[in-house]
Structures are given as C-alpha cells and as structure tokens.
C-alpha cells in the first residue's frame, strides 16, 4: 500500500469541483487556490486573501471536504492559509549574444519562502558532490544545462551505464537543483515504486489519482527503467504520461543500466520517444577520477588520508564508484573502531581481499553460470534448462544465490539469464541456499570455493 499523494488528491478534487460547479463560480473561488503542504491527515491550501478564505469556509468547505473524502477514501482535514496570489511562471529573456551560440538561461524565479525538504531526493546527491571527469563530462554538462532550464532543449534525458557509476546521483542532482531554485514540482521515484503505485491504482480503482500525480508534475525523474521490461501495462501508462509531459514542456529524466535500444520486450513507441532527447553513457572512472572521488569522500567524512593510501586504492579498485566508496567507508569504520589512523600498512591488510581479487566491472551472470556449471561437472545449458535431477537443481540454486550475492542484478534479471524463469523462482532458490547455510556445514566452504573461482575467472576474462 503506497502513501497517499495529497497533492494528487487535491488536483483530482479540483477536477471534480469544476464538473459540479458553474465555470464562473469555479474560476472566481478556486482558480487562485493552490496546494501548499500536508500533514498525516490534513492538507493545507493557499488562498489569496482573508476575504477569500472566509467566503470559502462559509460556502464551500463542506463540499470540498466531501470531495476530498470521496477521492482519498479517508477523512482529511482542510486548512486554508493566506499566501497571496501565485505569480505566473515567466522565463527570463535570453541575453543578446553577438556572434555566439545561445546558451541555456538559468531560471531566476525562486519560491517566496524556502520549501521544506523533498523526501524523494537525497540531500547529498548534488552537483557539488559529483566528481566530474572524462568518463562523465558530457553527462554532467547536459545535467547542468537541464537543471538551469528544465523542459527546454534537452528533453527527455536518459542516463545509462553499469551499476555503481553515479546514474542515480546525477539524476537526483538535477532534481535537487530545480527543487531548490524554482517552485516547480519535482517527483523522483524508482521504477519499482512507480510500478507498485500503478498496480495499487488498478486494484483500488484510483487510476485517476495516479494519472493526475504524474501527468501534472513539472519534473519527473524515474530510476532504473529497465525493470519495466516485459510489463506492457505499466509501459502503456508510462507512454501516455511521457506524451502528456513532453507536450506540456515538462522535464523528463530517466536512468537505465543499458542503452534503450538494447531493452528487450520494451514498447517500440517508448523507445522512439527516448530517441527524441539526448542520451549520456557513464563509464567507469579513470585513475585520476577515482583518486579525486576518494579525496572528496574523505574530506566530507572529515578524515585525514594520505596520498599514498589514496594511490593504492585508486589503482586497485577500478570497477565502479560504489565499490570504491564502499572500500573507503569500510577502511574508515575499521580505523575508527580500533582507534588507529589510516596507514598504508592498515589499508593493505584490511583491503587485501579486495586488492588481490577485485570485483570486476564485467562480472556477468553468464560468467557465474559457466563457472558454477564447470565446478559441478555440468554444462551452462543444464543450469539454464528444466532438468530436475537433484545435482542440477542444487547447482542452479547455488548459481542464482551467487548471482544475487556478487552482482547488483535484480531477481528478475537473474531469472531471465536462467531461461526466462520468474523472480519468485529465483527468490525460492536463494532462500533454499540461505536455509542450507544454517543447517549444512558443507555449504559455506562450497560457496567460498565457488566465489574464489568466479573471481579468478572474472579477473582473466
């Protein structure tokens, strides 16, 4: 069950009130009312004057409360707050340039009062904390331009690349900049949450609320759209939402783990919409960028770390940003708990497993399946197929477990690599291995040996 979207509820309430009231009556009393904020069971609506507030309370409060209850399915208290008339959004005129190319113009309008935190955006995912380098130069420049002039030149914007390369950080940096510098409404959501809200809307017959929430926002950011693969219903809804926002010149930003053209069972109409905008490919950071990321992270944590330690970590951890920061955080935690400074000796000792067999950026399920099959004297097709013999089933379950443990693939993605098995089958296999770890003392050594073989093979691959 998803949390109620109070702004979406208010928008739907307005639509229903417009249908019930005369147009002049609706325009006179409701066109200047706007959503401000909400509590657990209350919603605050802004009105332009005390006179307006008093008249609405006298003549319309009961009908508004009735409509809100009808739309939301629960009692929500209505509060009216005097805020003045809302200024129209106006884009500043671009500067006149002589012989130069037009550049994006930063939106200068700011809210009259500082808005509260957007719970969907992380405070630390900002441009200031995003390390720019040759691997992401184009993507960062495009993100900056979009954040200064959303909905204009670069729309939609797709950021794609492998796990741990900063796609989500860059997308949310766009959202944070727009949210902090304009009064635009910003929605940032994972594909999983979007899908769950869509299913809840269908189950509870509240698709009107779902549609209003996403089709009347100013900026829509969706993370990991590859998880919409083979889900035609939510793809259809995304297609219509995409069109509505694009036609209204609202900004769309998406992330994906691969180029959009490589998504299987994905609506061709959606793929064609993505081709209308720009796409940025994030690559693993180079040595200089890895060192810069380590220094910046250590500075934020308030930790002193020598260039010597930075150098050895930058040279030995090359898979992605996530692994790099994870190793540094583990090293910092160890030295803090032990009450010791970060020295080269401690770094080499504490990170020896990572340094000797680093997690490779190219570790795939195909590698895990191949190594696991060979370990048990089977073929990859045995594990991908439907054989039910005990030794094959166990090896298949173990390969699925290793895939979940050693990669960032979802259970759905893992299932696709095992002949199209669904995510419930994968979860069942993973839970089987977890259960055996508690009861069978031979399982853990087997997993350790298999993990080592997979890493050694990956390092040579």
Image: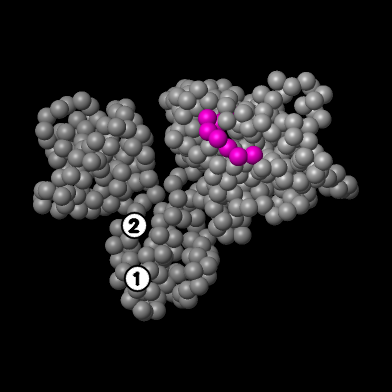
Q: What secondary structure is found at the residue carrying circle 2? A: loop
- Name the residue beneath numbered marker 2: 358
Magenta stretch holds residue 75: yes
Numbered circle sitting on residue 352: none
Q: In which quarter of the image is residue 152?
A: top right
Dots 1, 2 in contact, CB < 8 A: no
Q: What secondary structure is found at the residue carrying circle 1? A: helix
- Name the residue beneath numbered marker 1: 334
Establish if 67 lies above or below 327. Answer: above
Residue 85 is left or right of residue 72, and the answer is: right
**From mark 1 to mark 2, how far is it between C-alphas?**
19 Å
Is disc 2 surrounded by few (<14), some (14 to 19) or many (20+) residues within 10 Å? some
Closest to the camera, between mark 1 and mark 2, is 1
Q: Where the N terminus falls, by quadrant?
A: top left
What residue appears at the point 26 percent right and 32 percent down from the top-left corner? 425
Is disc 1 surrounded by few (<14), some (14 to 19) or many (20+) residues within 10 Å? some
Nearest to N terminus: mark 1 or mark 2: 1
Q: Give the range drawn in magenta.
A: 71-78
How is colour applied across the structure in the image? one colour
What residue appears at the point 21 percent right and 45 percent down from the top-left corner? 434
Establish if 114 lies above or below 78. Answer: below
What residue appears at the point 53 percent right and 67 percent down from the top-left corner? 300
Q: Can residue 379 be seen in this view?
A: yes
Q: What x and y, as percent, mark residue 257?
A: 47, 40
Residue 387 is left or right of residue 407, and the answer is: left
- In terms of depth relative to the viewer, which is nearer, 366 or 68? 68
Magenta stretch holds residue 137: no
Establish if 267 lies above or below 41. Answer: above
- In terms of depth relative to the viewer, which is nearer, 229 or 336? 336
How many numbered marks appear?
A: 2
């Amino acid at each position: 069950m998803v949390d109620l979207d109070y702004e979406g509820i208010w928008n739907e309430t307005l639509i229903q009130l417009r249908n019930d009231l005369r147009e002049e009556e609706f325009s006179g009393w409701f066109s200047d009312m706007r959503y401000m904020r909400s509590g657990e069971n209350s919603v605050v609506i802004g009105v332009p004057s005390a006179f307006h507030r008093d008249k609405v309370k006298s003549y319309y409060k009961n009908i508004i409360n009735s409509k809100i209850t009808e739309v939301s399915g629960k009692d929500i208290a209505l509060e009216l707050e005097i805020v003045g008339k809302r200024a129209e959004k106006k884009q500043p005129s671009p500067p006149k340039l002589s012989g130069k190319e037009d550049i994006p113009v930063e939106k200068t309008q700011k809210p009259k009062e500082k808005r509260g935190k957007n719970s969907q955006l992380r405070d630390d995912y900002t441009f200031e904390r995003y390390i720019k380098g040759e691997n992401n130069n184009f993507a960062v420049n495009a993100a900056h331009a979009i954040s200064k002039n959303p909905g204009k030149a670069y729309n939609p914007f797709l950021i794609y690349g492998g796990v741990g390369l900063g796609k989500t950080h860059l997308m949310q940096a766009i959202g944070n900049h727009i949210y902090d510098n304009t009064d635009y409404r910003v929605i940032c959501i994972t594909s999983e949450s979007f899908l769950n809200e869509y299913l809840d809307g269908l189950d509870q017959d509240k698709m009107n609320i779902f549609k209003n929430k996403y089709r009347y926002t100013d900026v829509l950011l969706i993370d990991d759209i590859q998880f919409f693969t083979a889900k035609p219903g939510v793809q259809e809804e995304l297609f219509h939402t995409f069109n509505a926002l694009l036609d209204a010149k609202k900004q769309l930003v998406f992330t994906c783990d691969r180029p959009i053209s490589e998504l299987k069972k994905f609506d061709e109409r959606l793929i064609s919409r993505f081709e209308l905008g720009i796409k940025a490919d994030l690559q693993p950071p180079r040595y200089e960028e890895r060192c810069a990321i380590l220094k910046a992270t250590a500075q934020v944590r308030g930790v002193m770390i020598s260039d010597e330690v930075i150098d050895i970590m930058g040279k030995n951890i090359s898979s992605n940003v996530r692994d790099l920061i994870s190793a540094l955080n583990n090293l910092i935690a160890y030295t803090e708990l032990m009450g010791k400074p970060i020295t080269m000796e401690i770094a080499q000792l504490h990170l020896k497993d990572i340094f000797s067999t680093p997690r490779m950026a190219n570790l795939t399920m195909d590698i895990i399946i191949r190594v696991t099959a060979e370990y048990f004297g089977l073929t990859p097709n045995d594990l991908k197929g439907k054989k039910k013999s005990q030794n094959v089933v166990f090896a298949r379950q173990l390969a699925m477990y290793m895939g979940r443990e050693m990669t960032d693939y979802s259970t759905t993605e893992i299932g696709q690599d095992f002949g199209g098995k669904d995510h419930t089958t994968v979860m069942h296999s993973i839970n089987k291995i977890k259960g055996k770890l508690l009861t069978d003392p031979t399982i853990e050594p087997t997993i350790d040996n298999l993990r080592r073989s997979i890493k050694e093979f990956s390092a040579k691959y």
